[in-house]
Amino acid sequence: MPRSLIFLLGLVLCGVSNSSAQEQSLWSGLTVSQQEKLLSGKALELEEDVPDSAWPRFTIYHLVQGKPDDVAAVFWNCELAPAYIPNCTSVRILGHPSPSVHEAEYTLKMPFFLPDEVYVSRNTLHKIGPSEYEISWKVLSSRYTKSCSGKILIQEHDDKTLLRYSNLVVPGGRFAGLLRSTAGNQVIDSVHALVHQVEFELSSDRGLLDHQLHELEKVREPAP
């Protein structure tokens, strides 16, 4: 991802230097009913209207079996995205401006017989605490969007991992209103797909996960 804008939404949350304080504020900032929903295994899906955008900011919370390292390693391996992310047909790394930054070209299948979306995203990884990661992304060029940016925050919570995925797209063109509902469903499905992929690798493909963890270890850098 990143991970990552999926179906016009790109690939990937607010970080502070104190990991335990941030984890406390992230979890305790939710209502009791929201916490109970997450503990039941369901995702928490929020929308926030944003001025000058036809689409809202989508924010998804999810509890994941596994460690923050596991989730970050799978998400950071954006070249694997076509294997499990809906409508993502290809990802190609274009370059590495630094060890913790990569730029990648994504191709997404569009509905309504529209030409594929092709966009380039700059993805940045920070390890901001002993058990906490932030991966952010910014779309540099796109066929259908004016701008797109987002973050995924990955934190340890009890014996699981709490993630918060937030993404904002400012769409362009006359199809924005038509695609709003589809785009929202797609980003939710993409987060579910990420969670499923992490849990699948933990239970059934440790070789792949170990490789991804090794790659993560080579590139992760602390936030300034």
Image (cartoon, rainbow, N blue to C red):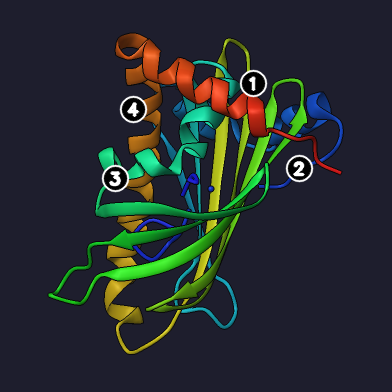
In space, the residues marked 4 and 1 are separated at their CA atoms by 18 Å
Secondary element at tag 1: strand
Instruction: Give the residue at x 30% y 83%.
Output: 175
- Residues at discs 4 and 2 in contact (Cβ within 8 Å): no
Q: In which quarter of the image is the C terminus?
A: top right
Q: Mark 3, residues whose alpha carbon is within 10 Å: few (<14), some, or many (≥20)?
A: some
Vertical placement of residue 77 versus 144, above or below: above
Q: Mark 3 points at which residue?
A: 82
- Residues at discs 4 and 1 in contact (Cβ within 8 Å): no
- Residue 45 rendering spot, x and y as whole percentages: 45, 46
Where residue 196 is drawn, which disc sits there?
4
Mark 2 residue type: Gly
- Residue 7 rendering spot, x and y as whole percentages: 33, 61
In space, the residues marked 1 and 3 are separated at their CA atoms by 27 Å
Secondary element at tag 3: helix
Q: Mark 2 points at which residue?
A: 15
In space, the residues marked 2 and 3 are separated at their CA atoms by 28 Å
- Residues at discs 2 and 3 in contact (Cβ within 8 Å): no
Q: Mark 1 points at which residue?
A: 156
Chain-order first, disc 4 or disc 1: 1
Q: Mark 4, residues whose alpha carbon is within 10 Å: few (<14), some, or many (≥20)?
A: some
Looking at this view, is 59 or 219 the one in front? 219
Secondary element at tag 2: loop
Mark 4 residue type: His
Looking at this view, is 55 or 67 the one in front? 67
Instruction: Give the residue at x 33% y 27%.
Output: 196
- Residue 37 rendering spot, x and y as whole percentages: 45, 29
